[in-house]
Amino acid sequence: MNKQANKETKEALKVLQNHAVIQSAEYWVQNAHEGGVVRGDLVALLIQNIAKKLTGTVPQPDPPEKPKPEPTPEPEPTPEPTQATKQPKPWSEIEKLAKAASVHIDIGFGGTGVLLKGGLLLTAKHVSNGRVSFRVKTYSRDWLNATLVAEHSGIGKDAVDLALYKIERPSAKLPFLSLSTDPLVSGQKLLTVEAEYQDWIVRTGELCQLSTKLQPWEFDCSVPVENGNSGGAAVNEYGEVVGIFVNITSVGIQRGSVRESVPGGEAVNLQHLSVLEWLKKWL
């Protein structure tokens, strides 16, 4: 037995047909009942026609939402360049650099000086002995003229054994050593060059005492210096100048369980505040 729409549905279909919502009620009478099945497109058309009669327009579907643009990732900040870690140089290379930058001071007896940047020459005051000018001989056997720039005025009543000269018309290729900015460390290895008239003699040792009570701007080391080393540079493991030798002394070193006295030297510490401030005026 076929099922049909009930009475109420049939009456409603007549109303819809009279208002031209549907063209014929027959399809709906046959299918619009419990358990019946109707086509989805006809249902959609029925709904649109009812809406048109009620509002005069067919509602338009909402436009699909445009996908929101993905946020542009901010560029990662460029890391600031880090300063390269300073590496120690082979001692064979430091020896070559120290020889090239060390000069023999021609004043009638042994004396050494070290060339710094800009054609400056640093030596001990007792070597130059107040001379306004003198000649120097380089490791490459060139003769150069040097003129006095300044002598350290001392600390209080005590003298600081340093003098600074300037090479006349220095060549752009003139070798030099840089001044160290690293703190001195007890036990670090040091090298110096004695610039004799004919030979450039290398000597090495270790820093033993950072300062003395009487002269805190000096340090002691086990470099077995000779008279000709006066005014020469104490050079660290980076090939940089940390001091200027000014005196011969004996220093105590530890050999196993025994402490013994060995030949050494005293040098002006170029990082001592009073020395550094004086150097900064000219460098």
Image (cartoon, rainbow, N blue to C red):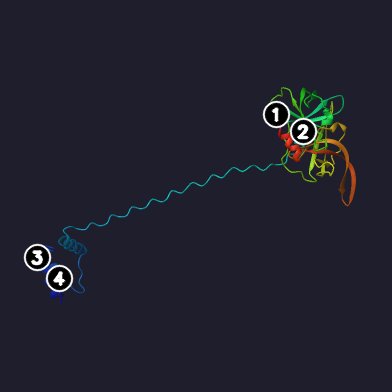
Label 1 – label 3 distance at C-alpha: 111 Å
Q: Badges 3 and 4: C-beta atoms under 8 Å apart? A: no
Residue 161 coordinates in the image, percent (x, y): 82, 34
Q: Is residue 200 visible?
A: no
Q: Secondary structure at mark 4?
A: helix
Q: Is residue 278 visible?
A: yes
**Is 93 situated above or below 256?**
above
- Tag 1: residue type? Gly
- Tag 4: residue type? Gln
Circle number at residue 118? 1
- Which badge, 2 or 4, is on the more N-terminal residue? 4
- Which badge, 1 or 3, is on the more N-terminal residue? 3
Report which residue position mark 2 lands on.
98
Residue 187 coordinates in the image, percent (x, y): 80, 46
Q: Give the crowd class for mark 3: few <14, some 14-19, many >=20 residues within 10 Å.
A: few
Q: Nearer the viewer, residue 52 or 219?
A: 219
Q: Nearer the viewer, residue 215 or 16?
A: 215
Q: Secondary structure at mark 3?
A: helix
- Tag 2: residue type? Ala
In the orientation shown, which residue stands out farthest toward the bottom?
1
**Is 153 situated above or below 210?**
above
Q: Nearer the viewer, mark 2 or mark 4?
A: 2
- Which badge, 3 or 4, is on the more N-terminal residue? 3
Q: Is residue 172 left or right of residue 109?
A: left
- The image quadrant of residue 6 is bottom left
Label 3 – label 4 distance at C-alpha: 18 Å
Residue 230 coordinates in the image, percent (x, y): 84, 33
- Which badge, 1 or 4, is on the more N-terminal residue? 4
Report which residue position mark 4 lands on.
30
